[in-house]
Image: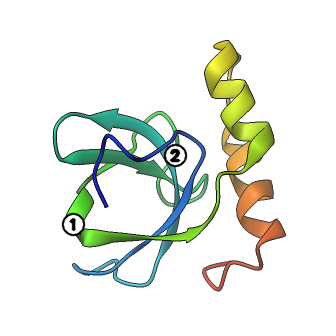
Amino acid sequence: MTAAGTILGQIVASTSGRDAGHVYVVVGIVPPNFLLLADGRGRRIANPKKKNVRHVKRVQPVVTHLADKFASGAKVTDEDLRQALATIGSPDKQ
């Protein structure tokens, strides 16, 4: 997986680090190798986690309504992220 092949609004899971197994939504891309990730709970959209692209894996295709919001420049809220993760049955619900 490369940062260039990643789309905002995509759901990924961390594969290494103390957050291994945690599910996030991609909220930003820092070329060439980093993604900004948030889940709307522990990692809010205002303070996303910077993670190397090699340390995450795609869990599901892009969440369409989130990708549309990112593309149009509309504000994406933490609630939007929580709802997107809830629809896939995220094991990280707390």
Rate crowding at label 1 as few (under 14), some (14 to 19) or many (20 or more) other CA atoms within 10 Å. Answer: some
Location of residue 31 with respect to 7 vertically, above or below: above
Q: Which residue lies furthest to the top in this view?
A: 73
Per the model, the C-alpha gap separating discs 1 and 2 is 22 Å
Side of 30 where 14 appears, left or right: right
In which quadrant will I find the N terminus?
bottom left
* Residue 7 picture location, percent across and down: 50, 42
Q: What residue type is labelled 1?
A: Arg
Q: In which quarter of the image is residue 25?
A: bottom right
Q: Position of residue 71 (x, y in %)?
A: 63, 21
Whole-percent x and y of residue 91? 65, 86
Residue pointed to by mark 2: 44
Q: Quadrant of residue 21?
A: bottom left
Q: Residue at x 32, y 80 (%)?
A: 15
Q: Give SS at disc 1.
A: helix
Q: Residue 54 carries which label?
A: 1
Expressed as whole percent of the image width and height from the top left, the position of residue 58 reads 48, 68
